[in-house]
Amino acid sequence: MKFTEITFATLILVVFLFFGTAAYFLYQEQLETKNLSIHLSHKIQEFEEQKIATTPSIIVGGNSSTVITTATSAQLWSNLQKTVQNTVVQLFVQKASFNLLEPYKVPEAGVQYGSGFFINEEGEIITNAHVVNQAAMIHMQIPSFGKYQFEVDLVGIMPEKDFALLKVRPEGLALIRAALGKVPYLSLGDSDIMRRGDEVMALGYPLGQQSLKSTTGVISGREGGMIQMSAPINPGNSGGPSINTHGEVVGINTSMIREAQNVGYIIQINDVKVFLKELRVERLVRKPYLGILQSMATEDLVRSLGNPLPGGVYIVDVLADSPLKGKLESGDMVYEINGIKIDLYGDMMVPWSEDKVSTAEYVARLTLGQNVSFVVYRKGVRKTFSCDFERKKLAPIRHIFPGYEPIDYEVFGGLVVMQLSLNHIPLLLGLASGLAKYVEDKNQTEPILVVTHVMPNSPAQRCRLQLVGSTLKLVNGKPVKTLAELRQAIAQTEEILTVKTSDNAMVAISKKDLLDNEVRLARTYAYQIAAGMETLIKKELTKQGNLGTTK
């Protein structure tokens, strides 16, 4: 009995010691955790104080800078917005959109809203090309002036890169200076140093709202020659600036992806800087290019050509209008451009991107007249050469820009015919899928004529053929590739005018039917009789001994 009592007492003592020890260690652990928490709290406070001390300054307006130091990122952006407000303007654009299928029609009127920003004391403004393209009139509003609108002129536009340069008219410039003391403007920063994770703020007037809005985000990376960021961009924001924490412009707000969230794109401001000088002297500035067709290579291809590894990009062809024609050849392998190595896939590592960029993106940074050097291997032989970066001529099949270059067409028998352009392809592709091949550079070197419209109740319409989107092969038995050749062929019509399309459809219209209907069609559809038909009419009047003029 005594033994049992001793055993039970011993058991109680062991349990007491176990839980007592556990409680002691638990207390010690809690004490250490508390001390660590206090220590970390002090460290975080020290870090925040250090961060505040090193918060970047905000630079606005070039030489007449305003410098602000803020305690937190949110306060920095808040103070920054107050400083830059009058530098970002809202644009009201009255458009006159050209009809690419019926080019004789009166342009369609429309209105578009967008954003822009001052870049200097002279009142120059940068915006997107798509905001002001085909503008008949441009007005702008500045926050400090309420709804008062200033007239703005388009100085230069580069639609292929989607930016444009505007300028406030002199009377408006004088009013701004009188009211504000100076023209408020934003300094252009360096987009090349922007890296993933850097903070940005997008400014503009989304959805046509007439008060300035901002969204903040971070740089996500680069894609397709543009900077991708997490700050949302909405319609109306286009043309506004995206700025860094110093208040410097690093990009132009340009687009978003509706199916995605927090994905916006801005044009790198350094791309704009390259062409600013040209925009001031040329109303329409075109994107330069090298005019070469290239393809990815493999190590086996490199070895088969006798070239050294790791290799370069393979040249498929050199286009007729390329500045490299006569120097670079099909079958060559380009290893370097301006001392920068090119890999098998046509990509290069450049200082202004964390990731490799394509040769097309690199070429987009070159300026006309710039000397460009190449290192090439041709069947194992190393060759070096250079050329001045100049466009010899425009590709026959290219984008056209109504309002900035002449647009020509011919009408005969109710057929509306134009030189095929890249603008026509999306409009006609549903009726003529064969036009898709002309999107490729290699198929743009020869001009071609396309039927863009067939007028109702015309000789051509009565042929009951689907001709819209067809390309012309022969007119009156003569090959035609240009409007000049077409007009010569029309003028030589005897008794019957014949048209053969590239897919071998045939149209035949008697000269009598052609002439009897032309004046009626011109009056009905309000177009001026085109040069080819006018020549044919004059020839017929001369033949009849009754020379006159057409109306």
Image (tube, rainbow, N blue to C red):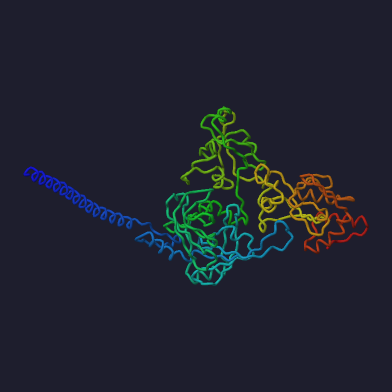
- Say which of 63 and 237 sits in front: 237
Name the residue furthest right. Answer: 545
- Report x, y in % for residue 322: 64, 42
Query: Can you say which quadrant of the picture contains the N terminus?
Result: top left
Does 66 sit left or right of 404 as displayed?
Answer: left
Quarter of the rendering containing residue 331: top right
- Report x, y in % for residue 20: 15, 49
Name the residue furthest front. Answer: 1
Does 261 sit left or right of 419 as displayed?
Answer: left
Query: Can you say which quadrant of the picture contains the C terminus?
Result: bottom right
Numbered marks: total:
0
Compared with 503, 59 (above or below) is: below
- At x 34%, y 61%, the residue is 71
- Report x, y in % for residue 138: 60, 65
Compared with 207, 289 (above or below) is: above
Does 371 sit left or right of 102 as displayed?
Answer: left
- Report x, y in % for residue 545: 93, 58
- Say which of 113 and 235 sits in front: 235
